[in-house]
Amino acid sequence: LALRAARPRRWWQRPPALPQVFGLRLFPRSGGADELALERALSELSGPGRAAYVLRELERLGEHEARTLLRAAGVDDARAALDEADSVPEQTGSRDESLLESAEFDPCSLQARPTDLMRRRQHVRAVLVAVVALVVCGTLLGVPGRGWGPNGAAAPSYARNPSSERALDPARLTRAAPDAWRNASRAGFSSWPARGDRVRDTALLRRALAVWARPGRSVRVSATLGTQSGPPSGPPQLLFAGEVDQATVVLLYDGLRVARYAEAGKGSAVALDFARLDAADAATSTALVLSRTDGNVRYLTAPWVRHAWVRDLLHPARAPRPLHRTGHGVTDPVRTVAQLRPCRGWPALQFGSRLVADLGELAPARLTYGAPGAGVRDVAGRAARASWARTGCRLAMMRGRGVRSVNAWRFAAQALPEAGGHAAWLCTRADTWRDTGSKVLAQFQPWDTRRGATGAVVSSANNSPACGPREPRVLAGVLWKARSGRWYLLAAGSRQVTGIVATGGVRGRGYGRGLTLPAKAGARADLRARLADGGRLSPLR
C-alpha cells in the first residue's frame, strides 16, 4: 500500500482507500501516545521509506533481503529507502512485539460507526428535490413551443377533478332560450340569451373557461371590491361571445358573478374581469360593459330593452340623443367621464324610464330618486333631474366599490337667513351588490345665482344604514356665510325630526325640522335631534 500510494496516478485511477460500506463509516482503531508518535514519524517518510521500515521492523528482514525485495517491487534506490527507514527513532513498544503489530496499524482491524444521520437526511432531501426539478424541467421542455394551445393563456392543469372538468367543457355551457326573459318569474342575467357572432366557437369558449379556472401569469385579472376570482363551481351561462373593437370578448355568468374574458388575438394580451351581480332584477340588469377603448364604452343591453338614449346627467334641460345598437344588443361607443372636463358633463344611459351611470365597473349603477323604501322611483320629472344635476359630480366618490344602485333623496328644504333664498338638503346613498360597503353623503344645495352649481358635501358615512330602508332618517348641519359676511349654523332633519339642539361652539334650540343660529367662522357645534317617537338622532358621520 505504501508503494502504491507513492506512485503517480492517472485521472481515472482512484486513490487507495479503506473499504466502503453504505451507511457506515470505517476507520482504524486509536492507539496510545507511542502509536501516535510512530504514526507522525512514518508520515514524514516517502513511500519506499515506509515500505523499508515495515520490512525491517515488522517482517524482521535483514538489510540484504530487504534491499532485494524492494528492488523486486520496483524501488529504484533501495539503499536510500533503507537509510530513510533507519532515521526513524526507535520506538518503545513491548518486550514481545513491535508497535506495528498493535491494533492501530492492523489494516484488518477497523471500527465501524454510522455516518452523520442529520447530514444523511439533508443529502437525501437534496437528491429528491433534484430529481423532482429534473422531472418538472423535462416535462416543460418536452412541451412543444410556448404559443397558444387549446387552453390559451391558462396555466397548466394541476389537478384532475371530474366536476371541475365538466365545468370547463364548452359543450356543457348553459344557454337561455331566446325568449326566456318573457316568461321568467324574475328577469335578470340568468334569462339573457347567448348573443354574439361567435357563440358556437368551441375553441374560443374553451380558452375562456380554461383561463377563468387557471389564469396564467400573462393574464391581467381584476375584480370589483368583495368579488372572488376563483373558478366556477359548475358550468356557467354564456351571455355573449363575439368581436368588439378589434378584440374578442366572452361574457359568462355563474349565478353570482359575471366574468368578462377579452383577447386581442392569439398570443397577445388577455384580460379577465369579475363583478359580483347576484340577485339582479330587471331594473339592475339592463346592461353590461363589453369594452373600454380610447375613453369610450360599448355596452351589451338586456333583451327587454327596446329603446336606448344617452343623457347628460348634469344638463337636465338637454334632450337625450338616441343610442344605436346592433341586432345582438351591442351599443355604439359612449363617451366616458374621463373624456370630459371635470364636472362639465356626465353621460348616463337611459333605457326606457331607467337611468344608469358608468362607475368604472362591468355593470353600470342604477340611479333612483325619492324617500327610502316604497318612495324610491326612477329619475324622471323636473325635480328629480334637477336634484341629480347638482349631485352627479359626487358619483366619482363611489367608483370602485361594486355599486349596485345610487339613490338621491331630498329630505328637507330651508329658508336661508338675510333673505338669502332657499336651500335643499339631499342625502345620497350608494348600495353595493354584496349588501355591505355602502356610502352615504349628506349635501347642502343653496339656490344661489350659480344655477345648477354642485352641492356641498357636509358629512359622509361608510357602512351606515342612514338614508336607507332600515333607517329612513337623517340629520345634517353646516356653517354658512351670508352675503353680509356674517356666519350662521344651519341644520335640518328628515320628516321624523321634531326638534334640533346645538351645543358646543354654537348653542341654541329649534323646534321643527330646521335650525338657524348665529355663529362664528370655524365654530364647532354638536347637534342632536328629537324624533316624533321620542327617540334621539345624531348627525350623519
Image (spheres, rainbow, N blue to C red):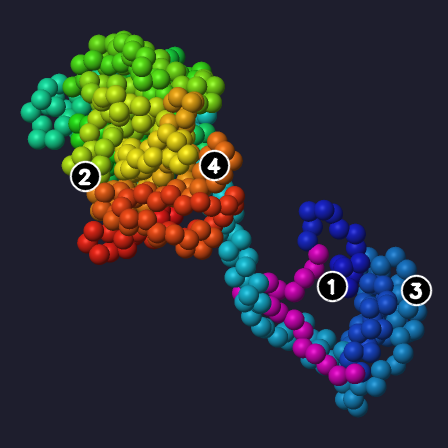
Mark 4, secondary structure of its residue: strand
Query: x%, y% of residue 41?
Result: 85, 73
Q: Nearer the viewer, residue 176 or 156?
A: 176
**Residue receiving disc 2:** 373
**Who's the residue at 47% across and 50% down the image?**
524
Query: x%, y% of residue 319?
Result: 29, 11
**Residue receiving disc 4:** 481
Q: Nearer the viewer, residue 155 or 372?
A: 372
- Distance (Cα) linking label 4 and label 1: 110 Å
> Which stretch appears magenta?
15-33
Q: Residue 379 bears which disc, if any?
A: none
Mark in the foreground, 2 or 3: 2
Mark 2, secondary structure of its residue: loop
Q: Nearer the viewer, residue 378 or 357?
A: 378
**Who's the residue at 50% across and 33% down the image?**
484
Q: Amino acid at mark 4?
A: Lys
Mark in the foreground, 2 or 4: 4
Q: Nearer the viewer, residue 488 or 154?
A: 488
Whether 380 is among the magenta residues is: no
**Residue receiving disc 3:** 80
Asked if residue 435 can be seen in this view, the reply is no
Q: Are marks 3 and 1 in contact (CB under 8 Å)?
A: no
- In the image: residue 384, left or right of residue 246: left
Q: Residue 1 bears which disc, if any?
A: 1
